[in-house]
Image (cartoon, helix red, strand yellow):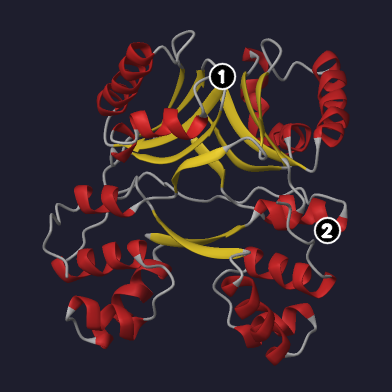
Amino acid sequence: MEQDPLKRSDARVLRGLVRYPLLSDKDLASKLDMKSPTVTAIRRKLVENRVLRSVEVPDFAALGCEVMVISLGSLVSYPALEERLASVSDLFQKEEIVYAFMEPGQDFMIQISPSLTCAMRNIHSIEERYQSQGFIEEPMQVLAFPLGTSEVYRYFDFTPLLDVLFEGKEREEVRKTHFRTRSVKLGRKESIVLSSLVERPEANDTEHSKRLDISRMTVGRARRRFREERIVERILIPDFSRTGIRLLVVTSARFHPRSSATLKYNLPRIMKLLGPAFFCVHDPRKIVAVSAFRDFGDYKRRFHELSEAYKEHEYFWDAPKRLLFSLDQSIVGKDHDYGPLVGKLLALGTEKG
């Protein structure tokens, strides 16, 4: 059932929280020209009503991952979605699978993996299960983005989307996000704290300290290092149904060779045509973006703009491909589940409390 829309003041605070996820209520109130108690009350209401939730996303490139793999599946529309998900739920527990979105005839999956071999092994396992159950119509489309040569332009960054929804415009900005190619060395306690932060993003330092049997000072010192070095970043995930979103569109496209030299200059324009996108990863040859729309009519208007730009500019080698997901018919099979992968990469096993 569709939820009531947000009040104007709630939407304003929601946008501020998503744009500035680490600001205190006092500092955010100053930016929004609101009273601090009002911001605190609205934040609490948004969290309690599950309109907004926090996720801590590690820099997986720094932890040893080499590739992000996107897979798109074209499936038969039966049996019921819940039944199909149940039949592959054990395979979806693979640590490298961090996000999966499904509707009766298709699915979209993100893996972050130490190697392409590992990611492909997971995809082949799912394909084999789908084939044995008669769910799949054709092989899954697989797009691999090596983190060393790719840019994660947006990683579930809902700031542009909320600007469009509540202001009617999208700011042209390129914000480097996660997964920079570098390595970090973490001490044993830092590794345990990092894993705990990812598994329980809403917990404070005292709660992590009690759970891990580590001093609060140690937890705070580790958290400060993670923030300063961007080893982990907080993202805030809004509830689509409360923001008026009813349609997600996954777009994949190949860049025209002539556009690769000027890609960084054209990317904001390309994103506005694909958008409003909250997820985007690209390398010099290809791009995958996930955009959100209020309804099909909203999407069709943006699609017309892209079609005209495709004719006018040589951004893409051929027409972009799209998968449309109706939120009324879809479910999330894996929802920002980063804890298992962090534990695997840091070799923590079952030693945490």
Residue beneath the point at 81% across and 32% down: 296
Three-letter code, disc 1:
Ser
Q: Is residue 308 left or right of residue 328?
A: right
| Secondary structure category for the residue under label 1 | loop
Q: CA distance from mark 2 to mark 1?
A: 35 Å
Residue drawn 30% across and 40% down? 93
Position of the C terminus, as image quadrant, is bottom left
Give the residue type at disc 2: Phe
Q: Is residue 23 above or below residue 121?
A: below
Query: How far across and down, in percent of the image, does residue 319 sit?
Result: 71, 13
Residue 210 spot, x, y in % from top left: 23, 83
* SS category of the residue bearing label 2: helix
Which label was assigned to residue 327? none
Camera-near label (2 vs 1) is 1
Per the image, the residue denoted by label 1 is: 77
Left or right, 306 with respect to 158, comes to right
Q: Earlier in the sequence, mark 2 or mark 1?
A: 1
Residue drawn at x 70%, y 35% as measured from the top left: 265
Rendered location of residue 139, percent (x, y): 44, 10
Whether residue 149 is visible to the viewer of this picture, yes or no, is: no
Q: Residues within 10 Å of mark 2 (few under 14, many from 20)?
A: few
Task: From the top left corner, tell me how far across and down residue 269 is, in percent.
Answer: 77, 35
For residue 98, above or below residue 37: above
Which numbered dot is residue 166? Answer: 2
Q: Which image quarter: residue 334? A: top left
Query: Can you say whether 340 is above or below 44 in the image?
Result: above
Q: Relative to residue 244, is residue 99 depicted above or below?
A: above
Task: Kindly identify the residue that appears in the image at 87 percent across and 27 percent down.
Answer: 305
